[in-house]
Image (cartoon, grey):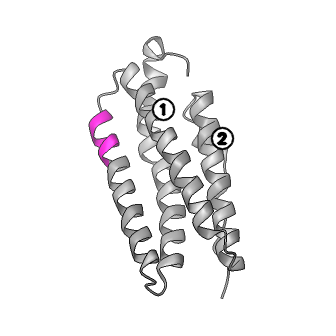
Amino acid sequence: MAGIPHLQWSQSLSVRVDGIDAQHKKLFEITNHLIDVFEAGSGDFLTVISELVEYTTVHFHDEQMVMMNAKFPGLAPHTAEHDKFIAKVEEFLQAYGEGRSDTGSTMVVFLKDWLFAHTSGLDMEYAQFLAKNSAKTKAF
């Protein structure tokens, strides 16, 4: 079986807010580390999941502040997607804790796919808004 592919950062994923771009890169790094830990069968799996969840929480807050300060009209649906993500991760963690088979691999693939889709999709919506409304953008 082939391994889970790593996430690759590219400039096309930039939201043009240096702090948020740095956070996205860090989320990619943590997710790639999670993939490695999972595939190695390391006992650090839950530690890395916890790191990812904690960092994601900080990132979501910071990202939402950027959108709020810029008066991005899509803030509410974007925040709802963040909330759905958190709820899904909580479901995975509960199932993993109960020892349900294949939960680990399903969780890792979900996290990787969701992060890439969210960064390359929804985040580009506010990136375009910020680019068009640069006067409204406050430094992060």
Q: Element under label 1?
A: helix
- Quadrant the C terminus occupies: top right
Q: Is the residue 54 above or below the residue 102 in the image?
A: above
Q: Is the residue 36 above or below the residue 77 in the image?
A: below
Count of numbered labels shown in the rendering: 2
Q: What amino acid does circle 1 point to?
A: Asp
Q: For this rendering, which residue is in front, 92 or 27?
A: 92
Q: Are marks 2 and 1 in contact (CB under 8 Å)?
A: no
Find residue 62 and name its label. 1
Q: Residue at x 61, y 42 (%)?
A: 12
Left/right placement of residue 13 relative to residue 130 reads: right
Q: What secondary structure predominates along the stretch shown in magenta?
A: helix
From the top left corner, tell me how far across and down residue 52 is, in percent: 56, 54
Residues drawn in magenta = 75-80
Q: Residue at x 60, y 49 (%)?
A: 27
Q: Is residue 36 magenta?
A: no
Packing grade of label 1 (10 A; few <14, some 14-19, many >=20) is: some
Q: Is the residue 76 above or below the residue 107 in the image?
A: above
Between discs 2 and 1, the one toward the N terminus: 2
- Quadrant the N terminus occupies: bottom right
| Image quarter of residue 100 | bottom left
| Image quarter of residue 34 | bottom right
Q: Is the residue 140 above or below the residue 30 in the image?
A: above
Mark closer to the observer (2, 1)? 1
Q: CA distance from mark 2 to mark 1?
A: 20 Å
Left/right placement of residue 49 relative to residue 29 reads: left
Q: Can you identify the residue that label 2 sits on?
A: 11
| Image quarter of residue 77 | top left
From the top left corner, tell me how far across and down residue 128 is, in percent: 45, 31
Q: What amino acid does circle 2 point to?
A: Gln
